[in-house]
Image (tube, rainbow, N blue to C red):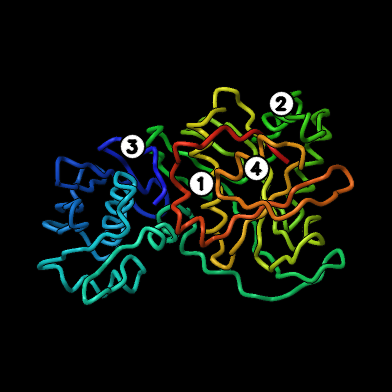
């Protein structure tokens, strides 16, 4: 089991998705889930046995699912050595079947058990449009490349997650050119950023730049925020239509990313251990057919590569783009969830803006 930096005994979870925000509070062995000042769930946690015994609940079945999920997310964070959590439902034993249907639990030897790698793949906890079904598979050809048709781009916030070790929320929203042009313009003209991106220029250049991304179905530009404060710019891409595709055996739903951390106040380990795994989490949740996330940092950028190693990316090979020699790096869905890479490790280090 990987070592975790851990976080305080009082935490919060599920700050996105449908329904009210939920707080998870622990008082010795009692765990309570509260929303809008009302108790939704009370349970007793036994760390030695790895059990959570429900003692009180309020609300309908959907509320129960979200409350149990919130409690479990917090407990897995507080206890990183906990491999599973067995629910003791008592008089609520009939709830086991609905929890199993929703993927919150699996039934093992007749007992409902929560597994962290399954829990963190439940979209409704973090995605704003969690109810949106997977886009039907249909192929198209563009730029001489055959690939799945991509869904219409989202508008507004797409993901948010409470970060216990920062006591803050990280979120991503789709770029709105009129709202965000000046911000992206300032960041692209930062000499530290331009050294990697080579996109410095005037407002008109950056308006054209963002407009071209908005019109490109395989690209999704995002703004990252801590609380209400924007801190970074992200470009997500579907790898099969991207310039990276010829350099490896690309799959239909592989996805890649570029990033700018534009605000100096949000550089550093504590922030990176929040936004980086949250961005990977979003890409894996956005379409459950995404099995791999790829990147192509400069092969000479050794510190960046070491940081990506710590984040779970494997180095596959070096190859030559027209503008740089790059290293193909790859993160597997299975590793991200099985190794709990959404939580920081003691060796996590700063990851600089990359492209």
Of mark 4 and mark 2, the one earlier in the sequence is 2
* Contact between labelled residues 1 and 2, with CB atoms less than 8 Å apart: no
Residue 115 position within the rendered picture, expressed as x and y whole percent measured from the top left: 34, 62
Label 3 crowd bin: few (<14), some (14–19), many (20+), radius 10 Å: some
Q: Residue at x 14, y 46 (%)?
A: 29
The alpha-carbon separation of the residues under discs 4 and 3 comes to 27 Å
Residue 338 position within the rendered picture, expressed as x and y whole percent measured from the top left: 45, 59
- Viewer-proximal residue, 246 or 238? 246
The alpha-carbon separation of the residues under discs 4 and 2 comes to 15 Å
The alpha-carbon separation of the residues under discs 2 and 3 comes to 34 Å
Quadrant of the image occupied by residue 119: bottom left
Identify the residue position indicated by label 4 in the image: 234
Label 1 crowd bin: few (<14), some (14–19), many (20+), radius 10 Å: many
Give me the disc on residue 7.
Answer: 3
The alpha-carbon separation of the residues under discs 1 and 4 comes to 12 Å
Label 2: state its secondary structure. Answer: helix
Circle 2 or circle 1, nearest the eye? 1
Residue 69 relative to residue 141: left or right: left
Of mark 4 and mark 3, the one earlier in the sequence is 3
Residue 187 position within the rendered picture, expressed as x and y whole percent measured from the top left: 70, 28
Circle 2 or circle 3, nearest the eye? 3
Q: Residue at x 82, y 68 (%)?
A: 145
Give me the disc on residue 186.
Answer: 2
């Amino acid at each position: 089991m990987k070592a975790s930096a851990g976080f305080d005994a009082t935490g919060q979870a599920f700050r996105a998705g449908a329904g009210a925000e939920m707080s998870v509070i622990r008082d010795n062995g009692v765990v309570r889930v509260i929303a809008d000042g009302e108790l939704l769930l009370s349970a007793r946690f036994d760390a030695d046995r790895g059990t959570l015994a429900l003692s009180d609940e309020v609300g309908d079945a959907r509320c129960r699912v979200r409350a149990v999920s919130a409690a479990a997310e917090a407990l897995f964070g507080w206890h990183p050595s906990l491999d599973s959590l067995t629910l003791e439902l008592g008089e609520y034993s009939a709830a086991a079947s609905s929890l199993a249907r929703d993927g919150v639990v699996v039934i093992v030897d007749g007992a409902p058990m929560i597994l962290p790698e399954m829990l963190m793949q439940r979209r409704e906890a973090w995605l704003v449009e969690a109810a949106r079904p997977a886009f039907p598979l249909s192929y198209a050809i563009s730029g001489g490349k055959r690939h799945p048709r991509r869904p219409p781009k989202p508008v507004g916030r797409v993901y948010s997650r409470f970060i216990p070790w920062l006591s803050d929320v990280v979120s991503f929203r789709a770029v709105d050119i009129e709202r965000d042009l000046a911000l992206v313009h300032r960041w692209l003209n930062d000499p530290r950023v331009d050294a990697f991106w080579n996109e410095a220029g005037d407002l008109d250049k950056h308006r054209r730049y963002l407009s071209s991304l908005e019109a490109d179905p395989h690209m999704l530009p995002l703004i990252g925020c801590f609380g209400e404060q924007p801190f970074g710019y992200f470009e997500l891409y579907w790898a099969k239509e991207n310039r990276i595709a010829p350099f490896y055996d690309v799959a239909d739903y592989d996805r890649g990313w570029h990033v700018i951390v534009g605000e100096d106040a949000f550089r550093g380990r504590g922030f990176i251990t929040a936004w980086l795994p949250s961005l990977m989490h979003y890409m894996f949740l956005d379409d459950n057919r995404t099995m791999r996330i790829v990147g192509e940092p400069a092969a000479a950028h050794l510190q960046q590569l070491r940081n990506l190693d710590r984040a779970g990316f494997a180095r596959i090979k070096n190859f030559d783009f027209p503008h740089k020699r790059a290293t193909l790096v790859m993160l597997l869905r299975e590793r991200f969830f099985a190794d709990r890479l959404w939580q920081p490790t003691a060796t996590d280090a700063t990851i600089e803006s990359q492209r």
